[in-house]
Image: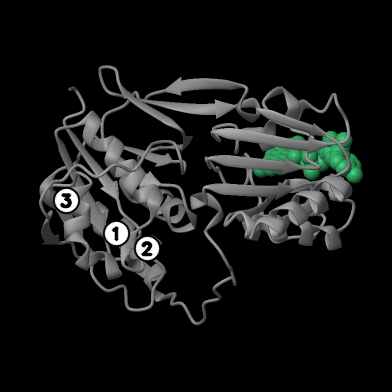
Amino acid sequence: MTVANLWVVLEPSGDSFTTTSLEVLSFARTLSDTVSAITWGEGSSLAPQAGDFGAGTLYDVGDLGGALPGVPVASAIASLVERVGAPDDILIPTSYDGRDIAARLSARLDRPVLSNVTGLRDDNGLVTEHPVFGGSLTVSARFTSEGPGIVLVRAKSFAAEASGGGPASVVAASPGDQGSSAGATIVNTHVEERTGPKLEEATVVVSGGRGLGSADSYVLIEELAKLLHGAAGASRAIVDAGWVPYSHQVGQTGKTVKPLVYIACGISGATQHMVGMKGSKNIVAINKDPDAPIFQIADLGIVGDVHKVLPALIDSLKGRS
Ligand SMILES: Cc1cc2nc3c(=O)[nH]c(=O)nc-3n(C[C@H](O)[C@H](O)[C@H](O)COP(=O)(O)OP(=O)(O)OC[C@H]3O[C@@H](n4cnc5c(N)ncnc54)[C@H](O)[C@@H]3O)c2cc1C
């Protein structure tokens, strides 16, 4: 292995690290024998999980005192680089906080960031893969100058798999001098209401598009998703139209999902949508246009009107329960 030493940022979320963090950590241990992790806040008590998924050492930035992670975590990583020496690369899961950490770390270390990464391999150094042109092509890239590369990895690029390792050893990582940016604190948080599983973790996703005709019809998507114990998703067209919040958007500029079953209802199948769901195990498409591009990747296609097909599906599922 030429990638001798990797660091992975692990974002805490309640009593676990985020799924994307665990996906990145799982893959990191296939690339390098020495994988360390950096976390903060509630992550401090998750050394057993960090070890189980492949980290030998867990650098703990500690309680952030009401600050967003970007400033203190980037500062702590920069201080660690000075104190213990730089790793070959620093892998960061893509999220709001992950992007913030990457950008601030880039400024602190004067190193570039490779973002939107969906694949990684060791080829005499780390090589990253990025989907371009709406996912129709993949380009490979590598850092050409000395110093740790900063890599932002997209959700669902790898599988999260425990390795059965013992707890990681916890080492304190002080944020050090954070400059004037440290003055910002969180004054309020808003947790978006959700029933059922998270979109990016659901085993069934039912998504609606412009073919629904109006915001009111989205209730059909929610009802079918609920009956299938799944999550409701959306195309960008209906997010832009204000029918549903951005958190529902699947695709290039939304979420990447890989459920067992993805049901696309009234969605044409633009490449920017498909890049976010084409990894689904089984794709079902309902569209009244037999030539809609979504049928090219569908395992099961229903040519029909969503206003007829969805109520019939819902009635039939209700009849079974
Ligand atoms: C930089 C960039 C990023 C983007 N990112 C994303 C992204 O992340 N996610 C995303 O989804 N899009 C994204 N888009 C937008 C994308 O290009 C498409 O415009 C969008 O996906 C179209 O949404 P849609 O399929 O709902 O609507 P349309 O393309 O308008 O398709 C509607 C479909 O519904 C069908 N239909 C109409 N009436 C009915 C009916 N009664 N019953 C059944 N079917 C019916 C039609 O035949 C049609 O196929 C992006 C675009 C750009 C340029």
Occupied quadrant, residue 182: bottom left
Horizontal and vertical percent position of residue 202: 52, 51
Residue pushed farthest bottom?
A: 187
Occupied quadrant, residue 300: top right
Q: Which residue occupies 43% across, 23% down?
A: 141
Q: Is residue 72 above or below residue 292?
A: below
Tell me which label, 1 or 3, sits earlier in the chain: 3
Residue corresponding to mark 2: 71
Horizontal and vertical percent position of residue 40: 28, 65
Circle 2: element type:
helix
Horizontal and vertical percent position of residue 144: 34, 23
Using the numbered discs, state the Cα–Cα distance from disc 3 to disc 2 in whole angstroms.
Answer: 26 Å
Q: Which residue occupies 61% across, 48% down?
A: 205
Residue corresponding to mark 1: 75
- Residue 239 visible from this viewpoint: no
Q: Which mark is residue 51?
A: 3
Q: Is residue 17 left or right of residue 239?
A: left
Q: Is residue 305 left or right of residue 105?
A: right
Task: Look at discs 3 and 2 and give the one toward the viewer.
Answer: 3
Q: Are marks 1 and 2 in contact (CB under 8 Å)?
A: yes
